[in-house]
Amino acid sequence: MLNRTRVFSAALCCCSLAPAAAWCGAPFSFDSAPGRLPKNVVPVSYDVAIVPDADALRFAGTESVRLQFRAATATVQFNSLNQTLSHVLLDGKPVKSVTSSDEQQLTTVTLTKPATGLHTLSFSYSGKIEAQPLGLFAQKYTKPDGGRAVLLSTQFEATEARRMFPCWDEPAFRAYFRLTVTVPKSWATVGNMPIAQRTVHGESATVSFQRSPKMPSYLVEFTGGDLREVSAMRGNTHFGIWAVAGHEQDGAVALASAEDILADYNDYFAYPYPLPKLDSIAVPGGFSGAMENWGAITYNDRILLVGPSSTMQNRQTIFSIQAHEMAHQWFGDLVTMGWWDDTWLNESFASWLAAKETAARNPQWRWWEQEDESRESAMAADARATSHAIEQHVTNELEALNSFDSDITYSKGEALLRMLEAYIGEDVFRQGIRSYVKNRAYSNAAAADLWNALRQASGKNIPAVAAPWIERPGFPLVSVTAACDSSGNRSVTLSQKRFLLDGGGANGAQWQVPLRIRTGTSAPRTVLLDTQEQKSAAGRCDEALSVNADAIGYYRVQYDADTLAVNTRLFPGAVDGDRIALLDDQWALVGSGEASLQNFLALASSMGEDRDARAWQQIVRALAIIEYAERGSPGHQAFAAYARALIKPVADALGWDAAPQETPNVGVLRDTLLRDLSRWDDQATIDEARRRFAVFVQDPHQMSADAQASLLAIVGQNADAATFAQLHRLAKDAKDDTFMQRCYVALARVRDPELAGQVVQIALSDELPPQANTLGLRLILTLAREHPRLSWDTYIAHQDQLMKSVSSDGRSIVIAEQTPGAYWDALPLDQLEAWARANIPKGASDNLARGMETAHHLAAQKLALVKATDAYLASAKHAAR
Ligand SMILES: [Zn+2]
């Protein structure tokens, strides 16, 4: 699953704190896998038939489950929600009693006498079609011809399959599924497997899909509606990209990518994709991410379809998300985590392999440099004293949604796997993965299964190195103190402590850290830092030194003053990845109060006209944070002038128009610089944007999507009433959802306070089409950048409307953990916390602690940055005299 909502767990735990717990450190075993359902009766195969009524939001169903009674019992318990069961029979004979509890999400069937061996439980039931992406849901949308329509689709992970059919809805209960649906005969239908039989009767068609492989219930999928596909056959696999009729041709790029990615993965795993087909379905709206249902991956259509309005960044997102969901066909579908403690076995792996595949297939994208941004986001979240471990105990599957934390479960996990791969080598790592997948195929796994496979492949004690990284929150700050001998040879003393947002982590070895040390531009060598303090040779004292070569490690590094001075002097000629690591670390150390702002700005100033996109992105992100902090203070103008002067030469050299043969990262850099120049009041940039917008409005087709995206953002920010109206008209008339959303978001960047009021009206109006069900919230959050208080007031007054596509569990997590970081400067923090506390359940208090730690840090950082910046600019002015 990808970013359904940014969520995480309330349970903070790790095996080092509770080593005796059954779920800690042991390979997967079905009997000891956690869960609520008893394991004495297990499903072998399901036959589920449903007849949905999309208009009434109801459906009728029948179900027959082949059960294995592993021990004699008269009680059968499974999950159900919002269903009424009738005609409940065991082997065709009535049972003694049936009780269902929606609160517990359980049904208990009591038999007339205990049973053993194989039996068949059958029943009829009725259920609810949801209007949100939970279980079987109805999605309304605007058709390409402007008319309205509805389709049905499913979203089951983590625990929503039980909304469509009663089942053993925990990941360890794998079974075969055979699904039958009766829908209007004009509809196309997609399931996990190819269609086995289709019978038309009157206006309806009854469609049966082939039996699925043995899999968990959360991977079952069904979509039906006025859909079309583009398709291809490659090797033994049929590929289909499905979209609502009229948009299917926008699936052509994704179709070609899917074929390439699957070929690469078949090779990587040495375990060919086992299903006869792989469909990808573009659902208009629904949910904001994608879901890896086996053989039938669902996507929000904007992250699968490539149309004329798609920018290079859109294409990159689409490829990388396809690579993520397709990686799940092995990590997640073929081999599933035994329980939600180990959600990372699915998500960290899919994120890591997707990045690797995206980088390999698109070398010109310099993808690992772009992934540095998500690593930084993870480290910012993980540097909180209140952070949680990757592996965390989920006591009850109803908390499972909490284990999908995009920073920790996805991005930190991805970074750790990359670090581990670099430590033991790509080939050895792949060998370990291959044996893990082969041994656990069609079954489940725990972390220990993976560590053992990697230990066997590498001959190294991987459990000892790897386990603390997933069982403990946080990461180390490695301190480097150099000494030079009389011939200029350098040796370094290395030590570690936990890195915290506000500094002050305790000294001492908590992790085994696989360092990659490079001197100058030579090949890096690996040193495992596994003691309190360690010495190592480190080239010559006049060479640059990186202790995190290529920015692969998930740790920060602090160099002593002399080494930092050498690194700063040699910064322009250093290896790109080493520069990225140094910029990341120096900025983080400014935030924690462990380095001076001056040192960071010295690195930024030494970039000159270098065009490394990632390095500049890091610099302008930092400058943007400072500029925002300075707003309203006397030093603002001087800082904005300083920031403009730093980036203007690079922006001028790049110009507004892409050069022929330009690589994508240069386009990304241009976009970043132009937006920031506008934000920092560069009048020439604003004027040129207005001139280009006038031309664009006359003939929108003359401009590339990439040029258009930067332009609209700048124009929106500086819009007067007439320009705002023009942009608004473009949004309303848009035929393409990607372009439509881009125009609306540009409106929400507006600085003018009166026009900002209009953005609020638009975000709450029904002019936004039904498939754009997350757009209203996005507009209000975008508005916060220029109008924090207006955005906040709207956000709290219209929670229900703005978060209509977020489940209630997801909503409390958004409120507790993400809202404080978004609105830290909109109102006093004690008021913010009081509001959040009143709007979340008690169980989310750890999440709120994390959110508030971020908010307090940002508020303190603002004060510190203003002070440091003003002092720096004053001294620079003094020096200039
Ligand atoms: Zn995923």
Image: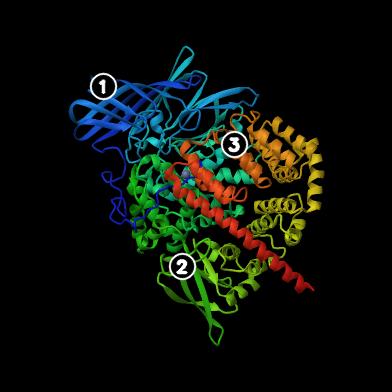
Of labels 1 and 2, earlier in sequence is: 1
What amino acid is labelled 1 in the image?
Answer: Leu
Of labels 2 and 3, earlier in sequence is: 2
What amino acid is labelled 2 in the image?
Answer: Lys
- The part of the image, by quadrant, that contains residue 572 is bottom right
Q: Position of residue 263 (x, y in %)?
A: 48, 45
Question: In terms of depth relative to the viewer, which is nearer, 22 or 515?
Answer: 22
The residue singled out by tag 3 in the image is: 797
Question: In terms of depth relative to the viewer, which is nearer, 662 or 705?
Answer: 705
Of labels 1 and 3, earlier in sequence is: 1
- The part of the image, by quadrant, that contains residue 315 is top right
Q: Position of residue 798 (x, y in %)?
A: 59, 35
- The residue depicted at 72 percent of the width and 71 percent of the height is 875
The residue singled out by tag 1 in the image is: 89
Of badges 1 and 2, the one in the foreground is: 2
> Which quadrant is home to the C terminus?
bottom right
Whether residues under marks 1 and 3 lie with C-beta atoms below 8 angstroms apart, the answer is no
What is the C-alpha distance between the residues marked 1 and 3?
50 Å
| 95 in relation to 789, above or below | above
Q: Position of residue 4 (x, y in %)?
A: 50, 40
Mark 2: which secondary structure? Answer: strand
The residue singled out by tag 2 in the image is: 497
What amino acid is labelled 3 in the image?
Answer: Ala
What is the C-alpha distance between the residues marked 1 and 2?
62 Å
Does residue 131 appear left or right of residue 702 in this picture?
A: left
- Please tell me how crowded label 2 is: few (under 14), some (14-19), or many (20+) other residues with Cα within 10 Å: some
